[in-house]
Amino acid sequence: MALTEDHVREELKKVIDPELFVNIVDLGLIYNVEFEASEDDDSKQNVMIDMTMTSPMCPAGPQLIANSKQVVSAIDEVAEVEVKIVMTPPWTPDCMTEDARDQLGIF
């Protein structure tokens, strides 16, 4: 089975923000997912993720990065995972899904 962005995003939903108790995909923290062929194994791909934080000094940042790498690395078709923190465009509550807004009581 080919690795897709949807598959990676589904796995990233397992990563829960420890302060807001909402997954990072629904929070809108995942901006981009890209793939690159692995040089070591033709059957696997490297995954590059652009991710943001709700604030530049988010104390949960290192935990969210580590957890993201862990869940994506567990996918059989993945060789390596790189998570890059980006702050442009800045995160706003508008980035959240309706599910996340409902969970947080934002209407």
Image (cartoon, helix red, strand yellow):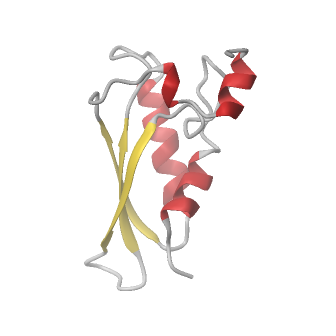
**Rendered-image quadrant of the N terminus:** bottom right
Residue found 26% across the figure and 30% down from its top: 88
Residue found 50% across the figure and 72% down from its top: 3
Give the quarter of the image for residue 7.
bottom right
Q: Position of residue 51 (x, y in %)?
A: 38, 38
Using the image, determine if residue 61 lies above or below residue 12.
above
**Rendered-image quadrant of the C terminus:** top right
Work out whether residue 30 can be spotted.
yes
Q: Position of residue 98 (x, y in %)?
A: 67, 32
User: Position of 4 compared to 62: left or right?
Assistant: right
User: Position of 35 compared to 29: left or right?
Assistant: left
Residue found 67% across the figure and 24% down from its top: 101
Give the quarter of the image for residue 59.
top left
Residue found 48% across the figure and 21% down from its top: 60
Q: Nearer the viewer, residue 5 or 18?
A: 5
Using the image, determine if residue 61 lies above or below residue 35.
above
Work out whether residue 74 can be spotted.
no
Q: Position of residue 25 (x, y in %)?
A: 56, 40
Q: Position of residue 5 (x, y in %)?
A: 48, 61
Q: Nearer the viewer, residue 87 or 98?
A: 98
Q: Nearer the viewer, residue 23 or 69?
A: 23
